[in-house]
Image (tube, rainbow, N blue to C red):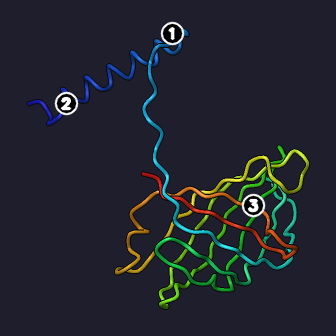
Amino acid sequence: MTAPNSHRRSFVMGAGAALFAASARGESGVTPPPSPRLTFVYEALVLLAKDVPHGRTPHGERFRAPIIGGDFYGTDFSGKIVPGGADWQLLRSDGWFELDASYFMETSDGVQIQVRNHGLWHSDSGDWPADYAYTTPEFEAPNGRYEWLNRRVFVGTVSPSPDSRPAVVIRVWAVG
């Protein structure tokens, strides 16, 4: 018995193999598909305490930046960054930082939304502005008004605060 869609899968896999073979031979003429659409979701100013060094590990030098507050404003919601989270940073031997932040946002109507934000940061000068600073935030929102955050893939940028405060500006877009 043939599994459902097995003919379609065979065709798609065969077409993909042909595309990769043509690419490997240096042949062009394949029109790339359209890029995913990005929709702006919000901008946050995340206030940070001074970095806390945690020492060198086999993976690199570890730091923690305590998150002490902030605000966010978006097209469908706004609110504050709840103090108590942290951005765990790993300075790798190649000069790149791996970012792993975990914190909560509280909407203006009192809903708590957990944020896990993973990313990479690099600057040839070792300081701002970064040459590369992107994240992939994930949200855990309770059922109700903001549950749509649980059903999307997001991409974000990280940049320094526009003033002298120890903070970062995070801008987030939904993919698709």
Q: CA distance from mark 1 to mark 3?
A: 39 Å
Instruction: Write down the quadrant of residue 57 in the picture.
Output: bottom right
Residue 153 location (% of width, % of height)? 47, 57
Q: Is residue 90 above or below residue 18?
A: below
Q: Earlier in the sequence, mark 1 or mark 3?
A: 1
Which residue is the site of mark 3?
159
Residue position marked by numbered label 1 in the rendering? 27
Residue 28 image point, x, y percent: 50, 13
Q: Residue furthest front?
A: 75
The quarter of the picture where the N terminus appears is top left
Outermost right residue: 125
Say left or right for 171 vs 126.
Answer: left
Mark nearest the camera among 2 and 3 is 3
Query: Residue 125 versus residue 5: which sits nearer the camera?
Result: 125
> Which residue: 68% across, 85% down?
84
Element under label 1?
loop
Question: Outermost residue, bottom direction?
Answer: 110
CB atoms at circles 1 and 3 under 8 Å apart? no
* Residue mark closest to the camera, 2 vs 1: 1
Mark 2 crowdedness (10 Å alpha carbons): few <14, some 14-19, many ≥20: few
Asked if residue 48 is positioned above or below residue 171 in the image, the reply reads below
The residue wearing badge 2 is 6
Q: Amino acid at mark 1?
A: Glu
Residue at position x 25%, y 29% in the image? 9
